[in-house]
Image (cartoon, rainbow, N blue to C red):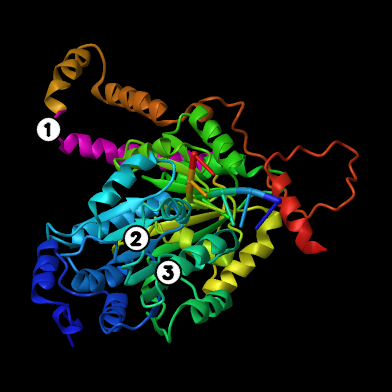
Amino acid sequence: MTLSFTSLGLSEGCVRHLEKLGFDTPTPIQAQAIPHLLSGRDVVGLAQTGTGKTAAFALPILEQVNLNNSAVQALVLTPTRELAMQVYQSIRNLSSDRRFWVQAVYGGQAIDGQIKKLRRGSQVVVGTPGRVLDLLSRGDLKLDNLNWLVLDEADEMLNMGFIQDVERILSQAPAERQTAFFSATMDPTIRELAAKFLHTPVTVQIEQPKAAPTRIDQVAYMVPRGWTKARALQPILELEDPESALIFVRTRRTAADLTRQLQAAGYSVDEYHGDLSQAQRERLLLRFRQRQVRWVVATDIAARGLHVEDLSHVVNYDLPDTVESYVHRIGRTGRAGKQGRAIALIHPLDKRKLREIENHIRQKLEPGQVPTRAQIEARHLESLQSQLREALAGDRLASFLPIATELGEEYDMRAIAAAALQMAYDQTRPTWMRSEKVWVDEPKNDKPRTRGNRSGKPRPSRRGSSETSQHFSSRRR
DNA sequence: AAAAAAC
């Protein structure tokens, strides 16, 4: 049973272009949603990001859009500006017709350029709610000819903070239109709002691909009692040695603070959150995607939809507020058939939250302990050896051979090699590990501490835990 | 209670 784009009802020209792009088999969500959308039905599509959602709604639109009319015929709303850019890019790639125009509109960027382009005409507009409303009230975006309205990441778009804007936009769109909600989760609010805004919708759901979770190794590192998460993070990162990582935190403030700490420790890392200017945000993403920055500390701005090629790690430094958000966050890794790792830092106060997550994903996270210095050093030596083997097989060796020969007249060859290794080893260690003072393995104190501070000594200060305890105390009541 | 989203 081979499925083709042709069998879904897409035209020959469209299918040929898709083949040129290297797409010959529809993904499950595409296979299910495209025929319904082509037939004019409203659709609720339930699928994770990275499953080909964008093409699932874009292809039927491209198939039926009137290219001889430059009025806006389709509007796609996304919850973040970067997602709008990303969706815009992939829609643009899906059409080869010169008469087809798609445009992205979002805040944080001069509105003049966006207005100018809108005046030139675009059949499809992708945007964030605030800027779309702004353009609507200025009269620069007109929805009179709108045939399609798509909410990407609908569960997020229908959240408290967004819902009013989205409702105002929906109310300005012609009633005679096709509407699609794409969402990773179907909670009661989505069902309710779908009933409100969609006309006898078909729900298509790709059965939770059992393959997705197994492509992500999930580990829960237990933060020892009395340790801050910041202190536990560095040894964990040393052992995990992520090629690239998104480190999720709860607030913008923590993002900035943690970034500064990690940078001071010598890591290639930068911050990403809503306190940055749009230009900074875009520059950061570009640098991250081009591998000029290895790790990014981010708020939930990066939890959804964001695509970074070959992201090796997702780190939940702070656990997310909702179990759904956990699924979104870890979904940034393990994409396109690659293996990914999702690690979480579990403070003693986070254990309840961890259980909720485990119940939701019906799977236990593999427990992990903060690595000891010995474990990290072993890991460093191991990677040094494999790097050495690579160098031995490489072609740059010749330029270093004369030095080795010269030194060889004075020293034993094995001593020279060992000294070179020592130099390389010292350089791979981050600054904080070079100082013995900072890095002291504390005896594991797993005895549950009684509430009263019996010893009478002041409690160790716990910088990182103040927000956490505050957060959970409200649940205790 | 925080984050995102318009100036």
| Quarter occupied by residue A379 | top left
* Distance CA(mark 2)–CA(mark 3): 10 Å
* Distance CA(mark 1)–CA(mark 3): 40 Å
- Chain of the residue under label 1: A
| Circle 3 residue | A213
| Circle 2 residue | A339
The crowding category of the residue bearing disc 1, from other C-alpha atoms within 10 Å (few below 14, some 14 to 19, many at least 20), is few
Q: Which label's residue is closer to the chain start, 1 or 3?
A: 3
Q: Amino acid at mark 1?
A: Asp
Query: Who is closer to the viewer here, A217 or A38?
Result: A38
Residue A34 seen in the current view: yes
Q: Which label's residue is closer to the chain start, 1 or 2?
A: 2
Give the residues in magenta.
Answer: A372-396
Q: Number of marks in the image?
A: 3
At which x and y percent is residue A30? 28, 75
Q: Residue at x 37, y 69 (%)?
A: A149
Q: Are marks 2 and 3 on the same chain?
A: yes
Looking at the rendered structure, the secondary structure element under dot 1 is: loop
Q: Residue at x 61, y 59 (%)?
A: A321
State which quarter of the image contains the N terminus of chain A.
bottom left
Q: Residue at x 19, y 35 (%)?
A: A392
Residue A85 seen in the current view: no
